[in-house]
Amino acid sequence: MSGEVPQSASVVIVGGGVMGASLAYHLVCRGQRDVLLLEQGRVFGQGATGKCAGGVRHQFGSEINIRLSIESLAMLDHFEADIGQAIGLNYCGYLFLLTRPADMAAFEANVSLQHGLGVPTEWLSPSQVAARVPLVRTDDVLAGTFYGRDGLCDPNSVVSGYVAAARRSRARLLTDVEVIGFDVRGRKALGVKTSAGDVAAGVVVNAAGPQAAVVGRMLGADLPIWPLRRQMLVTTPLPEVPLDFPFVIDFAQGLYFHREGPGLLTGQSNPSERPGFDESVDLEWEQHHLARAVERLPLLEHAGLAHHWAGLYEMTPDAHPLVGLVPGFDNAYVVAGFSGHGFMHGPVAGKLMAELILDGRTSTLDIAALSPSRFSASDVASAREYNVI
Ligand SMILES: Cc1cc2nc3c(=O)[nH]c(=O)nc-3n(C[C@H](O)[C@H](O)[C@H](O)COP(=O)(O)OP(=O)(O)OC[C@H]3O[C@@H](n4cnc5c(N)ncnc54)[C@H](O)[C@@H]3O)c2cc1C
């Protein structure tokens, strides 16, 4: 364990991924004392955050996701200057390849929404797509969308930057401490039970990522967040791939590629994957994925496998996160359920959650659309984010 568990804390954060680390940092920036973050792992950020592809993008299909990206990517842009930690931010751009007529109208609407919010995504013809990525097979491509201020960033550096900065301001961030329950009285969580002792708490925050529903159940709350396995692999060096190769997404196949060191990272979402905590690599799906990847990017035929791994998305019914008070509570919050694109939204999510806790409302953005209570009333299907890979 990286320190003693104190007997009490003003704010206890459960989970040391990007959400918990960002929240701890933003709370201490606002002057909050006695912030305690508890992470069950030996190292911070080795849950979904450490398994992620590192993509950061503005190209979404809902207004709230685009606004979260605008704020969050601006924070990543200033991260090194503000926090003193390099994070490998690389604006290589995101290129969506569209091959199904059915996706054209949705992407046209999404691009127009992005333009309206000040994000100048380009609509590319098939020949413009081919010119931008000559290594990619494009004979079936109907159109592409590209934005050059999308790109890549290193998740571990972001987490360790927030952890170090929060500790410099005297927040206590501990590893090897598992939260195993809460002391709940009526609408209040008065304390947190951990593997290293009990802590009296003023406020508790569930930032447990794919485990958020498990932590929610410890409070007696039913949070609609479930784990979904996603896997990817990195190839041996491919010197043919240019340094400015974008993050390429074949949207219809949920298949993607980007440069990773001297090789290429590629993943493909398995539409038949069932919710669960299994993080082993599905070798059968990997074979399927590799065959599709070689079809799209033929030079992969000559690449070897350097590493592969699986991690868990934290899905919700409308593929948007839950950010706010846990229904039924006055002092228990949740910031989880980012549905496979939470790394990029971690910076602003921590800031928004700090505003909610300290001010009772957010000032950076209106996040009514992310209310944890929304599922009881609204029509979830119509609000679903379209650009989920
Ligand atoms: C394969 C893959 C690719 C992805 N690609 C991208 C991408 O390109 N761009 C992007 O923006 N996002 C991506 N994501 C999604 C992104 O990784 C997540 O949305 C984000 O990291 C969630 O952060 P988090 O802090 O909520 O969760 P986590 O990082 O999982 O952190 C939660 C932490 O809580 C801890 N915890 C859980 N239960 C307890 C407990 N009881 N007690 C103490 N600690 C506990 C866990 O150990 C964990 O460290 C990807 C995810 C995966 C799996």
Image (spheres, rainbow, N blue to C red):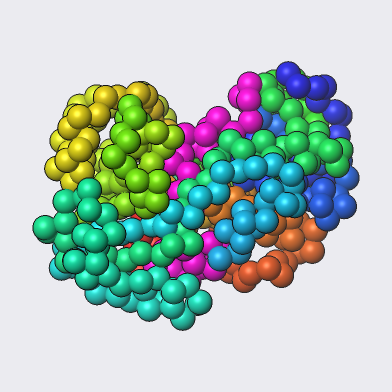
Question: Residue 165 location, x and y as percent?
Answer: 77, 41
Q: Is residue 302 above or below residue 217?
A: above
Residue 97 seen in the figure: yes
Return the residue found at the far bottom: 116
Check the picture and name the quadrant holding the N terminus: top right
Q: Residue 78's quadrant in the figure?
A: bottom right
Question: Residue 75 location, x and y as percent?
Answer: 65, 57
The answer to which of 380 and 302 lies nearer the viewer is 302
Q: Is residue 111 above or below residue 326?
A: below
Q: How many marks?
A: 0
Q: Residue 34's quadrant in the figure?
A: top right
Residue drawn at (50%, 77%) of the image: 117
Task: Tell me: 67 left or right of 102.
Answer: right
Residue drawn at (19%, 66%) of the image: 126
Q: Is residue 329 magenta?
A: no
Residue drawn at (85%, 28%) of the image: 6
Q: Is residue 47 magenta?
A: yes
Residue drawn at (38%, 57%) of the image: 94
Task: Tell me: 28 left or right of 369.
Answer: right
The answer to which of 351 and 139 lies nearer the viewer is 139
Q: Is residue 148 above or below residue 80?
A: below
Residue 281 seen in the figure: no
Q: Which stretch did the figure color magenta? A: 40-69
Task: Tell me: 239 left or right of 118.
Answer: left
The answer to which of 146 and 56 lies nearer the viewer is 146
Task: Tell me: 113 left or right of 189.
Answer: left
Question: Residue 309 location, x and y as percent?
Answer: 38, 27
Question: Residue 346 location, x and y as percent?
Answer: 59, 50
